[in-house]
Image (cartoon, coloured by chain):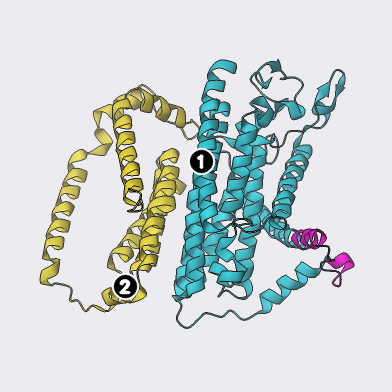
Amino acid sequence: MSMIRLMFYVMSFIAIASALYAALSKNLVRSIFVFFVTLFALAGLYVLALADFVAVTQVVIYVGGILVLILFAFMLSRRETLNVIQQRKSTFINMAKVPALILAALFLVVLVNVILKADADNLPWIKEAIAQKNVITPTSSTIDNIGVNLMTTYLLPFEAISILLLMALVGAAHLSRKEGSA
Amino acid sequence: MNYYITYFIAAIGLFSFSAIFALFGVYAERKISAFIQDRLGPTETGKYGTLQTFADILKMLQKELIVPAAADKWLFMLAPAVIFIAVYLGFAALPWAPGLIPSKTNIGLYYIFAIISIETLGILMAGWGSNNKYSILGAMRSAAQIISYEIPAGFAIISVVMIAQTLDLQVISNQQGILAAEKIKFAGFWDVTNIGGLLSWNIFRAPHLLIAFVIYFIASLAESNRAPFDIPEAESELVAGFHTEFTGIRFALVFLAEYSMMFLVSMIAVILFLGAWNTPLPNIGSVKLATWTTGIAWGIFWVVLKTLGLVAVQMWIRWTLPRLRVDQLMNLCWKVLTPLAFACMLISGVWRLWLM
């Protein structure tokens, strides 16, 4: 058990440290690459929580999709544009940062409140599940469960998301068409 | 504690395997290209030039590591490691023989699919870190190509998964031979559960998977940046693409990653479509060829033989076909392979419902 606990703390430390670097670094491209480390550490945390499917999906979608997309946007822009952001002087407290600071502080308050009030060790539904032995073991396959749930209980949200994605696809295809043939 | 030692041994073994494979792969590539172009290839170093790649790697180890003055130092230095580790991690979930798999996971196939996409990030890292027009153009071409070809490859894989009903690579392998727990039918009508061999491979279990196999194979060529899809490193336009600035051991790592990637994608193709570690010889009456040639040693032999066969086809294609232009590449991906892969997926669903 101690090995798992150790891994949890290592992963959490990596996730938090790299997220801080990504937020504080002035080198935008580098902070994106560090964000990749954050996402990977998060995937590790998911694995520790026995949510291996979620972990792999996280890597596929965020690393394979979203990060590469962001990087593409950077590489299509000029290096000088990025350097301007890097060289901008900034003090720690300044007027432009006030809204961001307020938002961050409020969000922190919400998060701390949630963590303190949730009392995750004594939730009734968790206790009930443990009593009924309705839990996932490290060797059990999670994909059957996810598939069945997606096609029964969560069918409506699933279909709604697929229609949303279809709309986005059609929209993107329309926008990228040449003017003459449109 | 013994547990962890086994893990380390497996990891080191896989690493040395990929290194040795890369050495012989480069030699084989040179000899095959020489044969196809009616040349001799390396002949001087060692008997028939067999020591040529060893000499090359010794030279590379001694070379100076040059970092361009304008490069982003950290990204530039880490990129080759990220590229190689992404490929190397994929080896963890590949089954080699009945009961022999480094990491037995329920979602092995999905894991490998995810891990391969990390290589894109390493390539973009190399391209951006080098601070060089050719490198960045190569990296962008490579990323665009890999992302696009992941779609037909993904759907070809899904059509297999729909037939196999699992993402566990060891279970998928088990289904394609005499060790199968369920009833295996050749082309949906002939029960070959006890005959095994060639007849129970996935491409014969459901014949439309033959098309899926070809789609996957073409897409895997693009994912490992091999000709005819090697525009990321097109020598005539981009010097050497994303690895233009790399020298010495870093350059060697990029190449190691490329050859490991060839082996990885070929082995996935073998596991999904060509019977994994199952023997191609069927049981004929009392001549139990399949039963005789199934086991741990035989399993490793068959899977390596089939994979090397596919790698040889990759090399043959590289030295036969000319490079595709970028628009032809995208046309092939989006207008030919993707619809075909969708059709395969649809047939898989129908096949599973009505014929299995």
Going by the numbered disc 2, the residue's amino acid type is: Leu
Q: CA distance from mark 1 to mark 2?
A: 36 Å
Point out residue B72 in the picture as x, y percentages from the top left corner: 44, 75
Position of residue A168 in the picture relative to residue B237 (left or right): left
Q: Quadrant of residue B217?
A: top right
Up/down of B306 relative to B283, above or below: below
Quadrant (top left, top right, bottom left, bottom right) of the C terminus of chain B:
top right
- On residue A82, the disc is 2
Q: Nearer the viewer, residue B327 or B201?
A: B327
Q: Residues within 10 Å of mark 1 (few under 14, many from 20)?
A: many
Q: Which residues are magenta?
A: B28-49
Q: Are marks 1 and 2 on the same chain?
A: no
The residue located at (54%, 36%) in the rendering is B340
Q: Quadrant of residue B99?
A: top right
Quick one: which chain is yellow?
Answer: A
Is residue A48 visible to the viewer in this orientation of the structure?
Answer: no
The residue located at (59%, 17%) in the rendering is B355
Label 2 lies in what chain? Answer: A
- Regarding mark 2 in the picture, which secondary structure is present there? helix
Point out residue A121 in the picture as x, y percentages from the top left corner: 27, 37
Quick one: which chain is cyan?
Answer: B
Q: Nearer the viewer, residue A145 or B246?
A: B246
Is residue B183 visible to the viewer in this orientation of the structure?
Answer: yes
Label 1 lies in what chain? Answer: B
Q: Are marks 1 and 2 in contact (CB under 8 Å)?
A: no
Going by the numbered disc 1, the residue's amino acid type is: Thr
Of badges 1 and 2, nearer the viewer stands: 1
Up/down of B224 relative to B187, above or below: below
